[in-house]
Every structure is written in C-alpha cells, then in structure tokens.
Amino acid sequence: MRASLSTDRIDRAWIVDRIVQVLMFLGGISAVVFIVGIFVFITREALQFVFSRFDVVEFFTSIRWAPTSTNNATYGALALMVGTASVTGVAMLVAIPFSLGAAVYISEFATGRSRETLKVLVELLAAIPSVVWGFIGLTIVNGLIIDVFDVPIGLNVLNAGIILGLMAAPIMTTIAEDALKAVPDRYREAAEAMGATRWQMIRRVVLPAAKNGLVSAVLLGVGRGFGETMAVLMASGHSINLPTSPFDSVRALTATIAAELGETAVGSDHYGALFTLGLFLFLITFLINLTADVVVRGIRNS
Amino acid sequence: MNGSESILDVRDLSIAYGSKTVLSGVTLDVRENEILGIIGPAGAGKTSFLQAINRMDAFNASMKVTGTLNFLGRDVRAWRNAYALRRQIGVVFPLPVGLPLTVYDNVAFAPRLAGKRSRAELDEIVERCLRRAALWDEVKDRLDSLGSLLSGGQQQRLTIARALSQDPVLLMLDEFSIAVDPVTTMRIEDVLKELRQEMTIILVTNLVQQARRLADRTAFFLDGRMVELGSTESLFNGETLFPETRDYIEGRFG
Ligand SMILES: Nc1ncnc2c1ncn2[C@@H]1O[C@H](COP(=O)(O)OP(=O)(O)O)[C@@H](O)[C@H]1O
Ligand SMILES: [Mg+2]
C-alpha cells in the first residue's frame, strides 16, 4: 500500500545535476575548441603562403632567411630550426642534471621544513618572467662567457642554452618530483629492509619505477625549450647562423616570429612565411607533448 | 633440535613514538634455530618490536628505542653499518610487497646488493629460493614478468623467497597470512617448518593457532608489555600464569 509513484518527480537535485553536467561539458570542450581554433587560424594564415610562394626544399635546407629583400626574397628556415634545436639541446644538458638532482634530493633526502622550503623556492623560480631571464642572459651570463672563455661576444648558443636550461629546470623538477613521490613508500621500506643503502634503493627501485614520469618531465622541458621566445631572443644574439660551436650566435624560430611579425603587412608573403614557421613550431610542440602524454599514460597502465 | 645459543638478546626494551610509550620493559632471548611466536591483539606493539630489531626506526624520526638489543652479541644500535645488519635479517611484511621489478630481479635484488654479479650464481640463487618458497613451479616460465603483477598469495611467497635470498641469520615474519588465502598460508607454514633447520625465525601472528602449530616458544604481548613467554606447549595446555593469556588464547578478546 505504501509503495507509490509520488516520489518519481523532477526535483531540485535532479535539475542541479543536469545544469552542472552541461557546464562541465562546456568547460571540457572549450579546451578542444581553443586548440582547434588556434590551429585553424594559424593554418589559414600560413596556407596562403604555402600554396603560392612556398618551396619545401628551400624552407628545410636553405639557411637564407631574407624575407625583406626587395628583389630576391628567400625563406630558408634551416638556420632558424638548427638555432632552436641547438639552444634547446644545450638547455637540456643544463636542465636535466639540475632538475633530476633537485627532484631526487627533495623527494628522497630532504625532510620536514627544508623540503617544504625547497619546493616553494622551486615554484618561485618557475614563476620568474622570461624577460627577466633574458635580462640575466644579456648582462650576467654574457659577461661571464666573455670573461671565462675569452670570446668577443657572449650572446650565443651557450648563453641562451644556459638561460633556457635554468628556466626549464624548475617545472621539470616539479614534475619529476611528483613522479618520484608517486612511488609508494612500501617499496622503499622493502628495499631498505633488505639492506639496500639509500642510494642503492633510489637507483634500483625508485628511479626505475618513476622512469616514465621522469621521461615526460624531460620531454615537457624540451617542449618548453622549443616554445620559449623572449629569453632566447635576448640571449642568443639573434643572428642567422648555422652554429659550429656553442659560441656562435643563432636565431630561433620563435624569436624570428616575435621580432618580425609586427613589421609585416597582413597577407604578404613575409606574413605568411612567419605563420608557416608558427605552424611548424605548433606541430613540433604538439608532437612532443603528445609523446610526453603517451609516456605518462604508460605509467598509469603499468 | 633447538640450540640454546641465543641469537638475539633483548633486555628491558622500550619503544615510544614521541611521548607515547607503546612498548616497555620487554626482556627475552631468541635462540638459534627456534621459531619464536609472538601473539597479541592489534596495537600491542608487535610490529614496533620487529622494527626495532632491524633498525627500521631509522625511518621514523619520532620512534625512540631504549634498552639493549644484542644481535649476534652486539647491540643493533652499535652496529656501525646498519645496512650490513639488515642484510642478515630477512623481513616479511603483513601486506606482500613485490618490488616493481621482474620476479627474477626481485629475488636477485639482495644478492646483487651483496655484490654478486655472475649470472650463473644469481640463476642458482633465484631458483633455489623460489623453490624453497614453494613458488618456483608457478613462476618458472615468467621470471621476467613484473613481480608486482603476481597474485597476493604469490607475491607473499615472492617476498619470502626474497628474504631467503639474503641468506639471513634471522627471519622475521609479521602477520604474513593477513592478506593470503588459507591454502597459501598452509603452504607457507610448511616452508617455515623446513626453514627452522637452517635459521632462526620470529613469527608474529594474528592467528593464535598458527603459533601453536609452528612456534617452539610463544610470547604474549598485550597493551605495550610482554605478559609472558613460555614453551608453546605449556601455554596452550593452560599452564599459563596469567588469566589474560588464557582468555586471549581461547578467543575471549582480541
Ligand atoms: N609510526 C607510528 N607513529 C605513531 N604511533 C605508532 C606508529 N606505529 C605504531 N604506532 C602505535 O604504536 C602502538 C603499537 O603498534 P604496533 O607496533 O603496530 O602494534 P601491533 O603490530 O601489535 O598491532 C599502536 O598504538 C600504534 O598506534
Ligand atoms: Mg602489526
């Protein structure tokens, strides 16, 4: 007799639940919409150039980037790509030991207050604006390189690499430390109970278990290196060059876009060429992030 | 069978976490080639006792150990190389901990720590220890799959194989059967009976009857003290001096 359908009605909780679902859905797809929107915009601006003036061979093999030449404009991006790659390479040589060392120290050795202080400091470092890093490169590192290596100019691959490495290290440290922290303590205790020293335990158990997270930290650092603009513009010397030593000045893809886009006419070949560089960068960073993501997914599944 | 030589000599041991004393005034000896059972309800201080023996207190700044714990004639805190001390003591935790390494590497872990590198020698140790832990037949075809992917019962036998690979003087088991099915529990109990010939075992157990089946002598811990220690036979025959012990053994509390 008490069984009744009178409770089967749409109540407040039901309505709130529906509204929240819709809002969350909008939030979720907006990320996708933005990414696709940006990609479409860049591609559209670039395509005009790609179809009219673009020469694949020239773009990837020539080092002559002379878009403003009035009678013979050329768009060879090789030097810019090598510039970006070399700076990123040096940056990783700097950042990987620093960030992994710091992450292992914070996660495995530091305790209590000193650990918390270190983490806050690392996060603070990550928040320093890139123009400030560029300024440090322009003044301090520049002077140091001139003095130490006795070269005429200190704005070069080495300088930009050091600056970029220091910039990327904090975020890499944070991600690497998260990966180490995700290794359960019971593994550490089991290893130490067997008589492993702290270092044996870290090397044989913790690092292998955190491997995927560490790789993705490094890849995100590489992505950061490819995308960084201001600091590289300031510290690299910004001159078109195929570098043969760390003391050569180079120009990066990003810096080229930033420096030149303001002076081009919308729709011109030069304008389109810069967007083509942008598209190229977009694809590269997308690939790097995708790889990092796949690697991280690997951790969760294992 | 029981040598009367004492491997571990505990005098007036007390353990505190911060200002909270969880174990006090424990005095006992562990004799060569015996199985010493330790029973008592949760929170009695059994795990803390084991941790003090292999100096796991080093990982917990608030854990304070006082008294003496002579292992092979030297107080464990006087051992200059705590790692060498731990290598002589095998530990099996309540929840199985397969390291995130292959089955092979799990068992070869301790021998490698001890500097063994030769593949043949490691192969021999891995097979021997897995056999003795009654696990070899189940894993011999998958030695290179992850140890952490084995079933709970298999992982617990893997941790026993790993403890044996240390070639320990003393084997300490902490409620090993808590996450293990009854069949595996019986198999491990058979393993322990054989191991008694070669090493000394401290068996902390939540199963009173397990102590009865395996232990030569049994200690009863309650509320941070050792109520009594006697031969398992006399304890279970009701020749106990303390009513709490009888109540616990007969399942009236705990
Ligand atoms: N890391 C710790 N910090 C603080 N107190 C603890 C810690 N570990 C155990 N204790 C306390 O010590 C007492 C004994 O615990 P334990 O040795 O684990 O007993 P048992 O193994 O007999 O259950 C319990 O009251 C427990 O709450
Ligand atoms: Mg316990």
Image: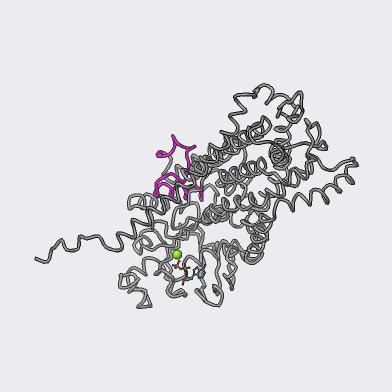
Please say whether residue B160 is one of the residues in the magenta stretch.
Answer: yes
| A135 lies left or right of A269 | right
Q: How far from the left and from the top, in percent, is residue B46?
A: 46, 67
Residue lying at the far left of the rendered structure = A1
In front: A132, or B53? A132
In the figure, A94 relative to B44: above or below?
Answer: above
Q: Quadrant of residue B38?
A: bottom left
Q: How far from the left and from the top, in percent, is residue A140?
A: 83, 51
Q: How far from the left and from the top, in percent, is residue B15?
A: 54, 72
Q: Which residue is drawn at 44% across and 75% down?
A: B223
Give the color scheme: rainbow, by chain, secondary structure or one colour.
one colour
Numbered label tally: 0
In front: A58, or A168? A58
Q: Quadrant of residue A13?
A: bottom left
| A156 lies left or right of B67 | right
Query: Which range of residues does the magenta coloring cover?
Result: B137-162
Q: In which quarter of the image is residue A89?
A: top right
In front: A61, or A172? A61
Q: Which residue is drawn at 75% across and 29% down?
A: A66
Ligand 2: give its quadrant: bottom left
Q: Which residue is drawn at 81% across and 34% down?
A: A245
Q: Residue at x 35, y 71 (%)?
A: B254
Q: How far from the left and from the top, in percent, is residue A9?
A: 22, 60
Residue B98 seen in render = yes
In front: A147, or A110? A147
Residue A89 seen in render = no
Main secondary structure along the magenta-highlighted residues: helix
Q: Quadrant of the N terminus of chain B?
A: bottom left
Please say whether residue A96 is one of the residues in the magenta stretch.
Answer: no
